[in-house]
Amino acid sequence: MKFSFTKMHGLGNSYVYVDLFQEIMDESKLSAIARQVSSINTGIGSDGLILIQPSEQADLGMRIFNKDGSEGQSCGNGLRCVAKYAYEQGIVQSKQFTIETKANIVDAKVAVENSCVELVTINMGKPILQRNLIPMVGALTEQVIAEPFTVNGIQLNVTAVSMGNPHAIFFVDKLKETDVLEIGPLIEKDDRFPDGVNVEFIEVVSPTEINFSVWERGSGVTQACGTGACASVVAAILTNQVSKNEEITVHLPGGDLYIKWDNHDYVWMTGDAETIATGVYYASI
Ligand SMILES: N[C@@H](CCC[C@H](N)C(=O)O)C(=O)O
């Protein structure tokens, strides 16, 4: 089996994109293909696989598979790349259009220079804060805001936010590499999160700036996570650590994202998206 692909990244969070307007893929093989293309040694090397596909509800749709083959409901960096691809390849003609994910339908807006998309803004929808919808077990409170959370004997406080996919956010005084590498994988698979969880460690720099690191569910450490950046800004506002209704700059290992939670309603994400390469992949499946 072979198929054409485009490799793209949003702040270093890279995926292999397959355009299902052009290609046909066997549903039963998607998970295995995601694992295969993600391998740096025997595949292309990426954080997973993203399918760009027709949609009945929106202008186009996307599906995201993590490095381990599990399917996620949404992907912020992926959405910006899909928006760039859709505009540059003529799937859409307007600079404003909608994209359907497993989680919701989002609005995308592209800023174009010399026919190239330079910047993408996505209305990511409203964050979900209800504990059972994150989902997270326990019934201490309906929302999970700075709740004591002990892991491996380490006492932390968790704020849980879903952007269509689950995020557990931990505020720390100073970011350390060991947080994501050692504690991240333990929390990802902690029983308190029945569907697993993306894990963010956040250092607040100023009322309009945060530093960010992530252990992604299904992919491990990545250079950036768009839904994670949105969830972290929501968590920082809920815990009164950054300004409300202002654009917050999120410094991720791969670069900056600009996030605004509009009057406790919609979350807006602005950032860039880059094309790395195109080619034909020969799958050994
Ligand atoms: N990198 C992504 C999120 C990808 C999915 C996530 N790992 C999950 O399983 O929920 C982003 O940019 O949002």
Image: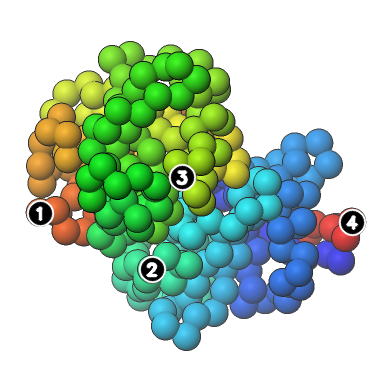
Instruction: Tell me the kind of residue under disc 4.
Output: Ser
Depth-wise, is mark 1 or mark 3 nearer the camera? 3
**Residue, x 50% and y 80% (percent of image)?**
55
Marked residue nearer the N-terminal end (1 or 4): 1
Q: Mark 2 = which residue?
A: 104
**Residue, x 50% and y 49% (percent of image)?**
194
Q: Mark 3 = which residue?
A: 193
Q: Mark 4 = which residue?
A: 284
Q: Secondary structure at mark 2?
A: loop
**What's the distance in space between the residues labelled 2 and 1, CA to CA?**
20 Å
Marked residue nearer the N-terminal end (2 or 1): 2
Where residue 164 sits: x, y (%)? 39, 58
Where residue 211 sits: x, y (%)? 32, 26
Instruction: Tell me the kind of residue under disc 2.
Output: Asn
Mark 2 packing: few (<14 Cα in 10 Å), some, or many (20+)?
some
Mark 2, ligand 1, within 8 Å: the answer is no
**The disc label shown at residue 8, or none:** none
**What's the distance in space between the residues labelled 4 and 3, CA to CA?**
34 Å
**What's the distance in space between the residues labelled 1 and 3, CA to CA?**
28 Å
Instruction: Tell me the kind of residue under disc 1.
Output: Asn
Q: Mark 1 = which residue?
A: 263
As drawn, 103 above or below 33: below
Horizontal side of 24 relative to 10 (left or right) equals right
Mark 4 packing: few (<14 Cα in 10 Å), some, or many (20+)?
few
